[in-house]
Image (cartoon, rainbow, N blue to C red):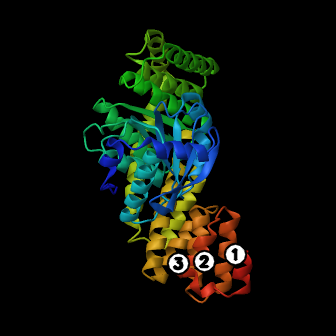
Amino acid sequence: MKKYRFYFLFLIIVFSCSSAQKPKEMFLKRVHKGEIIDNITCKTAPDQSYCLYLPTNYDLKHTYPVIYAFDPHGDGHLPVTLMKNQAEKLGYILIGSNNSKNGIAQDEISYIINSMFHDSKQKLAIDTTRIYLVGFSGGSRIACGIAQSFGNINGVIACSAGFPFQNTAPGFNFIGITATRDMNYLEMKKLNDNLEKINAPCQFFVAAGKHEWPSEDLMNEAMNMLELYAMKNKLTPVKQEFVNNFMIDNSKYAETLKQTNNIDSLIKAYSILKRTISILSDLTDVSKLKASFNEINQKAEVQNYFKEQAALEVYENQKQQEFQAAWESKTGEWWNAEIKKLTEAENSTSNLQKDLAKRLSGYISLSCYSYSFRALSTQNWKLAETFTSIYRKVDPENPDAFYASACLYANTNKKKDAVLMLNEAIKYGFKDKNKLQADPLLNSLHGMPDFESLLK
């Protein structure tokens, strides 16, 4: 896994020096509190912008914790919307980058981060002891990279991607979130296990689902944990009512799950109690939670579940390594056979095996994305044909698979097929018109009536 390193030339200056109050006052007159503002243009970098949410209690007499959010597609609005309601309750500023996205150069990422951090510091009353980051997928890797490079980050909510573990505490509170069918599940699970072994401050959520931004409820709990970490780290006074409500809500939910007495509910209750005990230790008495946790942990069906899970994770790691080596040596027929096996495994009676099959399919899909566009960029059309064909089979509703195929056909005298592939990409969610117009791999389609109609 590639480690992201960021060299911020002036971040320390940005977050340590005081700035005139007047720019903050002027900015507050131009914006509305309690509303999402989609495009705040950076004053010194007008090509950069971010989505902003200010809680209704925002007042320049105080400073406020801030969460900077990074979406892999540069959609700052999405994570801000996801966290808005809880930010209002907790009194957090939310800032979502509109420019940071997958596939851009490291220098450009640094420029984006510098511009956004500098501009927000000039315009907003930020508590510089409580700077948090959140990201999903490639955006999570960026968030983790920033936190590792810049020592003034208090916590990271990392959704579906993490950072390379180096046997030392990362220097910030880490909240990892993944899903049972997320191709990055194993990466996130290993990272959390390693952090727990060295007693680093960390929490781990596993939701039912696929590779996507977590639900609002899950993000709400993660944000509550940032608040609890701030209390544990003495960055804010302990709010006993908040602590008690958090414990009561999670305890009641876990008990309800226990009563159903099926294995999925028991595992969910186990996870809820484990992270609740971890976050609330040193803040309140968790002895009753520990007793309930131990009761679940001693059940034979729970222990059997964990044994099966561990065995499947070993198998998953082996298959990932096998797939990684196979790209250079195996034919399309071999890949078709592997995809067929995974499709059949999705009909297993074991939910763990179903989830594993989905994760491995997602792992192949992610590799296809990388290899397809690498082959396209080097004009290796033969390899691109192999990779895009596998891509569409393993992930038949992924817009990137059809977009990659369109790029291939546009450069191999199959222009009509290219437009058909673009229509499929749009059908499954592709919506970047600027990319269609600017991508040099699609230059041959310009002027075609069907392509121009598609743009409209």
Residue identifier under label 1: 455
Mark 3 Cα within 10 Å, few/some/many (few <14, many 20+)? some
- Is the residue 2 above or below the residue 381 in the image? above
The reply to whether the C-beta atoms of the residues labelled 2 and 3 are less than 8 Å apart is: no
What amino acid type should be assigned to the residue bearing mark 1? Leu
Circle nearer the viewer, 1 or 3:
1
What amino acid type should be assigned to the residue bearing mark 3? Glu
Q: Nearer the viewer, residue 329 or 268?
A: 268
Per the model, the C-alpha gap separating discs 1 and 2 is: 8 Å
Residue identifier under label 3: 385
Per the model, the C-alpha gap separating discs 1 and 3 is: 25 Å
Q: Residue at x 47, y 9 (%)?
A: 288
- Horizontal and vertical percent for residue 320? 41, 55
What amino acid type should be assigned to the residue bearing mark 2? Gln
Q: Residue at x 54, y 24 (%)?
A: 269
The reply to whether the C-beta atoms of the residues labelled 1 and 2 are less than 8 Å apart is: yes
Question: Which quarter of the figure has residue 260?
Answer: top right
- Is the residue 363 above or below the residue 94 in the image? below
Q: Nearer the viewer, residue 309 or 40?
A: 40
Q: Residue at x 32, y 43 (%)?
A: 17
